[in-house]
Amino acid sequence: MPHYRWLIIGAGMTGDSAVKGIREVDATSPIGLIGAEPSPPYNRPPLSKGLWKDQHLEQIWRDTPQVGVDLHLGCRVIQLDKTGKSVVDDRGTVFTFEKLLLATGGAPRHLPFDTTGNRIIYYRTVEDYRRLRALVGTGQRFAVIGGGFIGSEIAAALTLNGKHVVMLFPEAGIGARVFPAPLATMLNAYYHEKGVEVLVGEVVTDLRMRGEQTILTTQGGREITADGVVAGVGIQPNDELASAAGLPTDNGILVDELLRAGHPDIYAAGDVARFFNPALGMRLRVEHEDNANTMGHAAGRNMAGQAAPYHHLPFFYSDLFDLGYEAVGDLDSRLVTVEDWKAPFREGVVYYLKDGRVRGVLLWNVWGQVDNARALIAQPGPFRPEDLTGRLPA
Ligand SMILES: Cc1cc2nc3c(=O)[nH]c(=O)nc-3n(C[C@H](O)[C@H](O)[C@H](O)COP(=O)(O)OP(=O)(O)OC[C@H]3O[C@@H](n4cnc5c(N)ncnc54)[C@H](O)[C@@H]3O)c2cc1C
């Protein structure tokens, strides 16, 4: 029965960062890292960006194996006993621990009509990348379901690789849940110019096979034939292990400011954790890289005894063909938005306002302003829309 002073479940970016955090405090005690994927930790963002441009697969791997950790890969933990301080994996191995980190991330949502489960790539892992790469080698026509982060990045990646892409989603514009309506509408036209067939307000209702091809049927009565189908329709936090063990969950594992998950020796971090952020005055669950890295690192240090509250307001970023952005805070397009363009839809800042406070800032092709955006969100205000124009340099 392996025993670890520090045990981590989930060998993603958060798990890797936690290992590094622990090693800053404790150079020698055994660390166990259990991961359901067969691969050691790697960076996920290149799967939908760099690997379709100039990056190579060898460049995505993290250096986790080099910092002194026992990797147990291809093992899924199926049970957690918080009183006995042990977990069991799907091979029946029991691991005991002094302190545990749940870094189990999220699993892609599947579409209800996809009963076979093998025609659509719900894009998340390096295996999904390999599968799509193989299809790109033979196929020409691709359908991308979803207009959020994953859908918009994969549609751009496939188009840049010479494929015909049909992108479809129920909203009125690309990224419509995040971007103000004029920007989302502009993105529809921009993607169209780049060669993507963008179908807005379309919901896929069924699929059938014809040889190697997949035929999608939409609510609007369209049929789309594709050599490959990718879906990016959101993720669900992998919090079942925690809830079955009696730890507090609510669409994610609830953690306190030291990242403890309702038990003095059990922590949670990354995409799976819901934490309180003082600047926004609310609990957040963030599905982005900066949070995975920073929170994982903080959880590792906290577990190892260097406890410090996690008050970080994470930023996130994405690339859409030649456009790129960084963003901080609550980017909900239903809030009041103030658009401050230096060049319309090419360079500028969008502020998200609620009750006189700035809740979020979108830095559109504007770089080096993330900390200033964080400082603005922390300010009590009150701000009126007209106070914000020119507030951050575009
Ligand atoms: C294609 C793609 C592109 C992205 N691009 C960006 C970007 O441009 N910018 C940005 O900010 N963010 C981006 N993200 C988001 C970012 O990658 C995630 O926020 C980050 O990977 C979360 O890391 P995590 O370790 O918390 O969770 P995950 O990455 O989900 O890792 C959790 C790991 O735990 C494993 N696991 C789960 N349950 C168990 C169990 N019971 N036992 C063992 N193992 C288990 C899973 O298999 C998984 O390997 C992107 C994500 C994807 C998928």
Image (cartoon, helix red, strand yellow):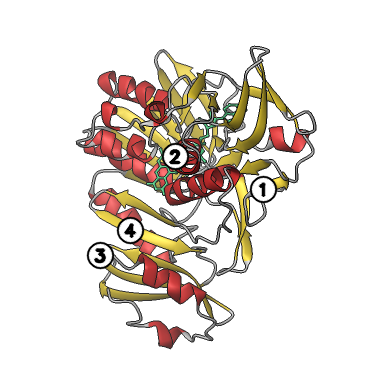
Q: Residues within 10 Å of mark 2 (few under 14, many from 20)?
A: many
Circles 4 and 1: CB atoms closer than 8 Å: no
- Is disc 1 placed on a helix, strand or loop? strand
| Of the image marks 4 and 2, the number of the one nearer the N terminus | 2
- Is disc 2 placed on a helix, strand or loop? helix
**Residue at horizontal 55 percent and vertical 70 percent from the top:** 279
Q: Quadrant of residue 375?
A: bottom left
Q: Residues within 10 Å of mark 3 (few under 14, many from 20)?
A: some
Answer with left or right where residue 239 lies relative to residue 208: right
Q: Which mark is residue 325?
A: 4
- Is disc 3 placed on a helix, strand or loop? loop
Residue type, label 1? Arg
Q: Position of residue 54 (x, y in %)?
A: 19, 36
| Of the image marks 2 and 1, the number of the one nearer the N terminus | 2
Pick the front one: 70 or 286? 70
* Mark 2 vs mark 3, CA separation in Å: 38 Å
Answer with left or right where residue 370 lies relative to residue 115: left
Quadrant for the N terminus in the image: top right
Pick the front one: 44 or 32? 32
What residue does disc 1 label? Answer: 260
Q: Quadrant of residue 373?
A: bottom left
What residue does disc 3 label? Answer: 346
What residue does disc 2 label? Answer: 20
Residue type, label 2? Lys
**Residue at horizontal 26 percent and vertical 67 percent from the top:** 347
Pick the front one: 374 or 157? 374
* Mark 3 vs mark 1, CA separation in Å: 42 Å
User: Foreground mark, 4 or 1?
Assistant: 1
